[in-house]
Image: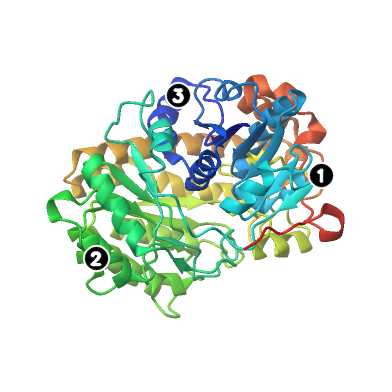
Amino acid sequence: MKVGILDILGLPARRPAEFGYRLLITKQFASITPQAVSVWCRRLGHQTFYATYYGVGRPDRQLPADLDVVFIACYTQVSHLAYALATLYRRAGVRTVVGGPHAKAFPVDCLRFFDLVVQECDAELVADILAGQFDPGSIVSAAKPFDDVPAVEERMPEIRSSAFFWGRRRLRLSAVPMLASMGCPYRCDFCIDWNSTYRPLSTDRLDADLRYVSRHLPGALIVFHDPNFAVTFDQVFDVLEAQPPGRRPPYIIESSLTVLRGDRPRRLKETNCAMVAPGVESWTDYSNKAGVGRAGGVAKVDRVADHFAVLAENVPYLQANFIFGLDTDQGDEPVELTKRFMDRTPFVYPTINIPVPFGGTPLHEELAAAGRILAGMPFIFYYAPYLVTTLKHYDPVTYYEKLIELYAYAASPQMLRRRLQTSSHRAIGYVHRARTASFRADIASFRQILGMLRSDRRFLAFHEGRTATLPEFYRRVGDRMLGRYAELLSIADRTPDLSPADPGRHHLPIGKS
């Protein structure tokens, strides 16, 4: 059989700046599971074609046209592009399969466009799909997420395709995706991994992958895709520290401050950690991840800032992840506390996220039950700068005003100067400038939305949940984002079906464990 695997990483670039970002940065966001699917198909003897689409070129031309089966992986923001491509493939008689974060979050909506929707996946399930074991219109799943991640060496055809330029040339930005664990021990209500089981993966495989990278791809940047890296810290770092000091590849991780305590920041430095992105999330909630006990408010800010200061002595680049607009946020306090954090830690770049209710999460269930999800909002807007829910303590106008205040503080000339003064790495200085420019572009988008909230009563009514009629603004922007593929999806196609999967109606066969 001819089998295609397409990992969709971004929407089509529309401006020169977007083109450059997609080419240099988005290209490196390739996921591990699509690469694993490609390896499993190749092991079965199928003629296998793997590609990523990162916003440059024609996504419908990344794979051969005469496939028998196509697997498409996507996250929610790019799901409409996946739907459009599935429409084209089905017209050509290709069996279509979707997986990834969006399929897990909104499987019922995916069934409108794909023959099969995959939630959890493993090699045996992929073999059953290719053998035609499941009827079209099914949501299928392995009994549990796979643990046997194909080695870097076996994934090299996919890594060359996704991370190298023209499939041959490796640049300093070229990233090798790896995993040391699956799942997460925390139960954050907004996260699609909220109910996953944390499972360390084989340390022998981790050791072999590190040695392969250091020998065959010296200096290559490893990006660990673990939701929370090194929860079993000593077990993982015994492997990292076993690598020869002069041959330890640089690596990027997401982890929690609870994990990165004591002398562990020093061990990050000694093993060549290039970047850490802990999730702080909120000054009033999720404190178990921050390692501050029950502390909140100013006390939490100061303790978290002190912890980041220790990390900054050992790791070149730090990012802190926040969500603004949670039900625990109200008034000026979240804004002022985040400003205080930025003042104390100019060496940390903040990401400030808008709450997004991904299907299957407790947040989604709570907001859906309360009628607080804007049900008519297309999935293509499930990311900043767009608000897809009504907030508990902020009306839309006030929320965008405060969001602009936060972003303007983070992107101010004074803050940029302080960031540059705290960095001794020229490359990090370039990153600070680029991210500041991105924040300023976001501010322009926030101001555009704020202007319409103030001047257009129907637009405001939609965002207050008083009407389900989608404003024309979102129809135009959605068309622009999809470009030539917009004509493949009607207005009804873009209106999401947020209902959960019903085993009696949607046939949920479970793969073997």
Q: Is residue 11 visible?
A: yes
Q: Are marks 3 and 1 in contact (CB under 8 Å)?
A: no
| Residue 45 percent location from the top left of the image | 54, 37
The structure residue drawn at horizontal position 49% and vertical position 38%, both measured from the top left corner, is 442
Q: Which residue is mark 3?
A: 19
Mark 2 against mark 1, which lies toward the viewer?
A: 2
Q: Which mark is residue 107?
A: none
In the displayed structure, 485 sits above or below 218; it is: above
Q: Residues within 10 Å of mark 3 (few under 14, many from 20)?
A: some
Badge 1 element: loop
Left or right? Give the position of 436 relative to 422.
right
Considering only order in the chain, which callout, 1 or 3, is on the residue closer to the N terminus? 3
| Residue 509 percent location from the top left of the image | 75, 57
Q: Which mark is residue 265?
A: 2
How far is disc 3 from disc 2 in space, using C-alphas? Answer: 36 Å
| Residue 160 percent location from the top left of the image | 38, 33
The structure residue drawn at horizontal position 44% and vertical position 70%, both measured from the top left corner, is 289
- Looking at the rendered structure, the kind of residue marked 1 is Ala
Q: Which residue is mark 1?
A: 468
Q: Nearer the viewer, residue 454 or 421?
A: 421
How far is disc 3 from disc 1 in space, using C-alphas? Answer: 34 Å
Quarter holding residue 203: bottom left
